[in-house]
Image: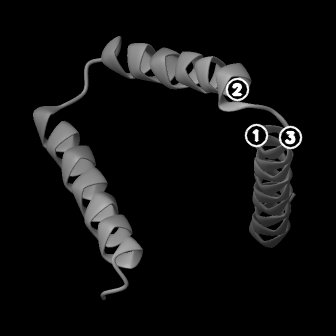
Amino acid sequence: MNDSNARKHLDAKKERNREQRIEGIKRWVDYIESESADTWGPQQNAVVNDQIDAAQSVQTPASHKQYVKDVAAEIMEVSHESKNGSK
């Protein structure tokens, strides 16, 4: 496989992965719209808690931790602004 074919193969794989993630998100939205928060809330909490545990189990540089905090703060700010109707 030459470089061009390898690139096309990788791009196609990335696109398939993206499509699968979008489909998974759509299934999750359908699920949370059809079930009560009492049902899906603990499930979501378990997933998030497992992700946090996994992230904490690796040695992450302080600079990356700060970057993640900064990105999260920016997302929260944008979310807050959009809820208040301002930009």
Q: CA distance from mark 2 to mark 1?
A: 6 Å
Q: Is residue 17 left or right of residue 70?
A: right
Q: Amino acid at mark 1?
A: Ile
Q: Amino acid at mark 2?
A: Trp
Circles 3 and 2, Cβ within 8 Å, touching? The answer is: no
Q: CA distance from mark 3 to mark 2?
A: 10 Å
- Give 9 or 5, whichever is nearer the viewer: 9
Residue pointed to by mark 2: 40
Residue pointed to by mark 1: 32
On screen, 63 above or below 55?
Answer: below
On screen, 6 above or below 27?
Answer: below
Residue pointed to by mark 3: 34
Residue 58, image quadrant: top left
Residue 8, image quadrant: bottom right
Q: Locate residue 79, reporting x and y percent.
A: 37, 66
On screen, 35 above or below 57?
Answer: below
Q: Amino acid at mark 3?
A: Ser
Kindly identify the residue that appears in the image at 22 percent across and 42 percent down. 64
Residue 61, image quadrant: top left
Q: Is residue 46 left or right of residue 82?
A: right
Q: Locate residue 87, reporting x and y percent.
A: 30, 88
On screen, 81 above or below 38?
Answer: below
Q: Locate residue 60, reporting x and y percent.
A: 25, 27
Kindly identify the residue that appears in the image at 34 percent across and 62 percent down. 75
Q: Quadrant of the N terminus?
A: bottom right
Which element carries disc 1, helix, strand or loop? helix
Mark 1 or mark 2, which is nearer the start of the sequence? Answer: 1
Circles 1 and 3, Cβ within 8 Å, touching? The answer is: yes
Circles 2 and 1, Cβ within 8 Å, touching? The answer is: yes
Q: Residues within 10 Å of mark 1 (few under 14, many from 20)?
A: some
